RNA sequence: GGGCCGUUAACUCAGUUGGUAGAGUAUCUGCCUUUUAAGCAGAGAGUCGCGCGUUCGAGUCGCGCACGGCCCA
């Protein structure tokens, strides 16, 4: 690592040579007037009026390939908008510029001024009348044909991945577009975009282990948020009747192809509606975003065709357990028989929850995770979640042991979670107290009491429904990515050495 | 946490039963004014992830560790 490789050593010698010839390797006074897109537009719009002399373009970009002949060269360079070939002739740019050009390397940034012509093979090419070095690369880029493949290097040095692999670049362009389209979707429906605390004194809104930090001046512990939920609902109390936030959550758990310790979540809340309305809204939003981003409402994910166009199946948790998990409905309310069933399938529920007495709801949702979730390939809303695993969801009027809640599954992944909110402060307080008791009983991910949130509810919150959608997982679906690391620019990695 | 796989030149990869470390691209030198992974001739470039062990001798065999990938929990 500390030993300079041959190739970099040679590059450094070349740099010293350029410097001694008074070449500024990092100038900052060159005007760039055009993008490669401008040039392509000109070619597409009026190819017949183009000559070697006009129009004249001034573009800049990173040199990606060079074919050198004696006194002329073809190069390929790219900017953010595309890639273009240039032809550099010694008799056109002059002896001085050409001898500088001969010392340039793949990876360097150059500026070219010139008109366009078509080569023998019919490729539009800029014919340089001026050529400048505008930024020098000291390290060599990976080889052009095979590119950069080593996944570790791709994640650690994402910039190289982005330079070398257009598919990777495309994924992140799509990710950006996904977020932009979501934002547009909600703004168009009169939602207000807000930002709520990332550092919270009481971590709430989800079952997860938080990251802990410390505020020196205030002399207090703070937690990186595991969800924005309780703050967004405080805003609903405050009169923002439709709010959304797209931002990071942090959960102190392992990394996998589906989990990164920080991930992006969309949460939104809308008054005077129910979880049923949100299912409809969710379908509408996914359809709109998929169409805008991929051009179609039929996507392919890891070989599965997934239809975002037609309406999605809705079924209860119990029905799903019966249909996909092979669990007879007579078992659903019988803890012991369910536990027997679980162990017959090799599922150790006690180990998973860490609790002395295991709640029925925990057993059911764990069985669901293992037996049903991977089979829900087509988009499916699951409803009817038990109260004990839904401490922020409104109890169902018809069946108070269940809640007005759904989760959305696509391609075997949980994508969204939504429900009608509890707006009765006494009910919410009881639920928190039960969570505190569960925590005492060994459930380390149970919710904490948030007195301040109860106080807010006591001022009155209108009937509201809210939902969270995992943006990384949505991005995985719409870019056909098997791992969450492929849709996060800088996934967390252990430092080397 | 467990299992499997990977780590060799700047990049992508070979490397046989253990016997002087290989290729392509890239780099450097020379020739070349329409190439498309340009071509021709020549050259340089390696702590084989790290450590310990076995052996006359380890990229190769064994043990441990690190980092990464996939799968399972």
Image: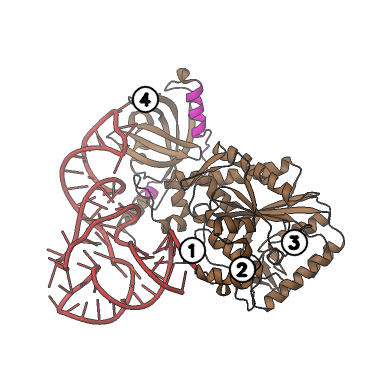
Chain colours: A brown, B red
Q: Mark 4 points at which residue?
A: A122
Residue furthest to the top in view is A48
Residue A462 image position (x, y, % from top left): 84, 54
Specify the subunit that label 3 lies on.
A
Sequence-first tag of 4 and 3: 4
**CB under 8 Å between discs 2 and 4:** no
Residue furthest to the front in view is A330
Q: Mark 3 points at which residue?
A: A230
Per the rendered image, the range of residues in magenta is A17-45
Report whether mark 1 lies on the same chain as mark 4.
yes
Residue A80 image position (x, y, % from top left): 50, 40
Describe residue B27's horizontal placement relative to residue A257 as left or right. Answer: left
Sequence-first tag of 2 and 4: 4
Q: Taking A73 as reference, is A271 above or below it?
A: below
Specify the subunit that label 4 lies on.
A
Q: Taking A80 as reference, is B2 above or below it?
A: below
Quarter the N terminus of chain A occupies: bottom left
Please say whether residue A42 is one of the residues in the magenta stretch. yes
C-alpha span from label 2 to label 4:
67 Å
**CB under 8 Å between discs 3 and 2:** no
Residue A421 image position (x, y, % from top left): 76, 57
Specify the subunit that label 1 lies on.
A
């Amino acid at each position: 690592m500390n030993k300079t490789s041959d190739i970099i050593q040679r590059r450094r010698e070349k740099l010293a040579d350029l410097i001694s010839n008074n070449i500024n390797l990092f100038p900052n006074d060159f005007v760039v007037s055009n993008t490669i897109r401008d040039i392509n537009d000109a070619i597409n719009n009026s190819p017949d009026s183009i000559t070697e002399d006009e129009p004249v373009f001034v573009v800049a970009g990173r040199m990606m390939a060079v074919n050198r002949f004696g006194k002329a060269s073809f190069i390929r360079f790219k900017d953010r908008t595309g890639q273009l070939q240039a032809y550099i002739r010694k008799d056109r740019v002059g002896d001085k510029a050409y001898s500088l050009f001969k010392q340039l390397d793949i990876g360097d940034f150059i500026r070219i001024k010139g008109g366009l012509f078509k080569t023998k093979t019919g490729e539009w090419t800029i014919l340089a009348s001026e050529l400048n070095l505008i930024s020098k690369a000291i390290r060599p880029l990976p080889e052009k044909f095979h590119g950069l493949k080593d996944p570790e290097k791709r994640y650690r040095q994402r910039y190289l991945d982005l330079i070398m692999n257009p598919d990777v670049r495309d994924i992140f362009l799509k990710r950006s577009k996904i977020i932009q389209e979501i934002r547009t979707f909600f703004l168009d429906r009169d939602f207000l975009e807000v930002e709520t605390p990332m550092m919270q004194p009481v971590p709430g809104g989800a079952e997860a282990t938080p990251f802990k930090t410390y505020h020196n001046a205030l002399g207090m512990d703070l937690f990186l948020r595991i969800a924005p939920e309780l703050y967004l609902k405080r805003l609903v109390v405050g009169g923002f009747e439709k709010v959304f936030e797209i931002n990071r959550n942090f959960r102190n758990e392992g990394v996998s192809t589906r989990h990164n310790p920080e991930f992006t979540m969309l949460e939104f809340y809308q008054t005077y509606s129910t979880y049923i309305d949100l299912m409809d809204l969710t379908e509408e939003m996914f359809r709109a975003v998929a169409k805008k981003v991929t051009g179609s409402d039929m996507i392919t994910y890891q070989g599965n065709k997934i239809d975002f166009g037609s309406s999605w199946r809705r079924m209860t948790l119990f029905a799903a357990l019966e249909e996909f998990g092979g669990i007879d409905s007579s078992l659903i309310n019988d803890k012991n028989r369910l536990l027997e069933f679980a162990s017959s399938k090799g599922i150790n529920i006690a180990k998973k929850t860490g609790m002395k007495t295991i709640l029925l709801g925990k057993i059911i949702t764990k069985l669901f995770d293992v037996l049903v979730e991977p089979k829900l390939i087509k988009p499916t809303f699951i409803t009817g979640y038990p109260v004990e695993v839904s401490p922020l969801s409104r109890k169902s009027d018809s069946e108070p042991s269940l809640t007005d809640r759904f989760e959305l599954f696509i391609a075997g992944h949980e994508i969204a979670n939504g429900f009608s909110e509890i707006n009765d402060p006494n009910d919410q307080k009881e639920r928190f107290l039960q969570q505190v008791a569960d925590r005492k009983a060994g459930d380390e991910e149970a919710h904490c009491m948030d007195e301040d949130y109860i106080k807010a509810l006591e001022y009155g919150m209108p009937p509201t429904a809210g939902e969270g959608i995992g943006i990384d997982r949505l991005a995985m679906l719409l870019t056909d990515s098997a791992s969450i690391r492929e849709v996060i620019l800088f996934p967390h990695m252990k430092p080397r050495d």
